[in-house]
Amino acid sequence: MLNHIVIMGRLTRDPELRRTGSGIAVASFTVAVDRDFGGRDGGERETDFIDCVAWRQTGEFVSKYFTKGSMIVVSGRLQIRNWTDKDGGKRRSAEVVADNVYFGESKRSSDSNSAYSGNSGNYGGNSYSAPSYNNAPTPNYGGYSAPAAAPASDFAMLEDDDAQLPF
């Protein structure tokens, strides 16, 4: 079976970070997602408000770097919960359990010298990259990085004769 959902929208409020009895972090937040089509009369597009929950480090990340109005991309699974309200009535709720969370936009390049302020409204396009931070060291994730310049002795010019090609 497949249960995978990806949504992109803006946070309707600041994420709420709580901890379970055993100290596990859990962040709750709601994402406003515009529908791709207008109403029945072709008018204004409707918006869906989707409840999300992020656990452990993902929840701490959301709580630390996202605020009300931030564009967010959430990848995870849809979960239906059954619960009982104050009056004893049986209720059901749908929520997205976030596996991965991404920045939905980056700050404009004109603001690259200022610290990230979250809800400043200064956003760029949909680049899915983290904003730049003042004086923050660039982490080394052990990935491949190409050498700055190859030594000139590694290359030799070939004549126009195809016989010199190795294939």
Image (spheres, helix red, strand yellow):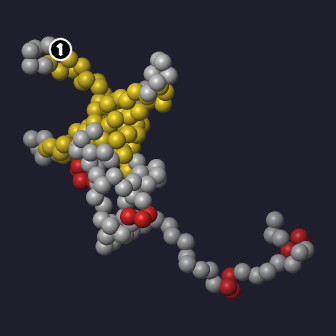
x, y percent for residue 42: 50, 22
Q: Which residue is mark 1?
A: 90
Q: Residue at x 59, y 80 (%)?
A: 149
Which residue is situated farthest in the bottom direction here?
Answer: 153
Height in image: 157 above or below 118? below
Height in image: 128 above or below 77? below
How crowded is the residue under tag 1: few (<14 C-alpha within 10 Å), some, or many (20+)? few
Residue 75 visible here = no
Q: Quadrant of residue 134?
A: bottom left
x, y percent for residue 54: 27, 41
x, y percent for residue 81: 24, 24
Q: Residue at x 38, y 39 (%)?
A: 9
x, y percent for residue 19: 14, 44
Q: Quadrant of residue 110?
A: bottom left
Horizontal side of 19 relative to 155 (left or right) equals: left
Quadrant location, the C terminus: bottom right
Horizontal side of 161 relative to 79 (left or right) equals: right
Q: Quadrant of residue 111?
A: bottom left
Count of numbered marks: 1
Residue 104 visible here = yes
Q: Residue at x 14, y 13 (%)?
A: 89
Q: Residue at x 68, y 82 (%)?
A: 154
Considering depth in this image, is 2 or 47 the residue closer to the camera? 47
Considering depth in this image, is 13 or 75 the residue closer to the camera? 13
For the residue labelled by badge 1, is the local secondary structure a helix, a strand or a loop?
A: strand
Give the residue type that dot 1 points to.
Lys
Quadrant location, the N terminus: top left
Considering depth in this image, is 12 or 6 the residue closer to the camera? 12
